[in-house]
Amino acid sequence: MRNKHGIAGLAVFAIAAVYTCYQATGMHAERESWNALAWVVLLFTAFNAVSKPWADDASNMRSFLLHTVKPQDWLLARILYYSLMLLGLGALIFAAFLLFLGMDPFTGSGALFFFLGIEATALALASLLAMIQALAARAGGGFSLIAVLGLPLIIPIILVSTRYGMDIMKGIAFGDTAHHLLFLATLTGGFTALGYILFPYLWRD
């Protein structure tokens, strides 16, 4: 949290991306465009968030942490940090989309259900990218390794999120499409568990 300018930069990036979408599509975007652009902006904001280097990724700090912190605690703390950050950025992105592109695609409580999808996707992205970023930092691969490892695993998240968003915009009852949120929650738990199991082995290398 001492790096407040970095968080502010992510917020500006997200709002600028939404405004660019507004300039490209106008106030009354088709629901397919509205849906696709929302997930694209969230995805690139998430990648931009994890691309920032951490002070504890340096070799001298790592040597200190090896003797003071459990690797599972270190990873869970990073996942929690990215989860809170992306939940906030997801809410900001959704509010900006409503402001610039309008609420025409939604009927009734559709906007609320779509927002739940944004937040569930943010948690799934946070757990996945935090794990991959931690692995890439320990392997010395940098952002290029994050992209190589992350993009194939992100495909199912985006496919599920996009389908859920279109269901909501088409007016399908929430109960008939809520299983997509359950799948996203399962991915979040699975990625967290996978990192919890595998990361200690890389931590000791």
Image: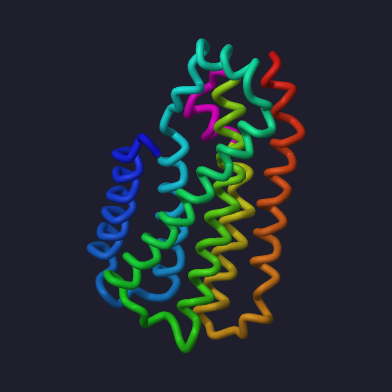
Give percent across and percent down for residue 40.
44, 55
Does residue 141 lie above or below 185 as drawn? above
* Residue at the extreme right of the image, as rendered: 197
Residue 168 is drawn in which quadrant?
A: bottom right
Say which residue appears at 27% left-offset and 69% top-offset: 100
Residue 144 within the segment the image draws in magenta: yes
Residue 56: image location, x then y, percent: 50, 22
What colouring method underlies this structural image?
A: rainbow
Q: Position of residue 13 (x, y in %)?
A: 30, 48
Q: Residue at x 26, y 74 (%)?
A: 27
Taking the spot 30% from the left edge, 45% from the top edge, the residue there is 8
Instruction: Residue at 51% x, 44% y: name it.
Output: 82
Instruction: Name the quadrant of the N terminus.
Output: top left
- Residue 36 pos. (x, y %): 45, 63
Q: How many marks?
A: 0
Q: Is residue 142 above or below residue 80?
A: above
Above or below residue 83? Residue 33 is below
Verify whether residue 58 appears in magenta: no
Q: Identify which residue, 169 or 6, lies in the foreground.
A: 6
Numbered range of the magenta stretch: 139-149
Task: From this view, report whether residue 165 is shown above or below residue 37.
Answer: below
Q: Residue furthest front?
A: 68
Q: Quadrant of the C terminus?
A: top right
Provide the major secondary structure of the magenta segment: helix
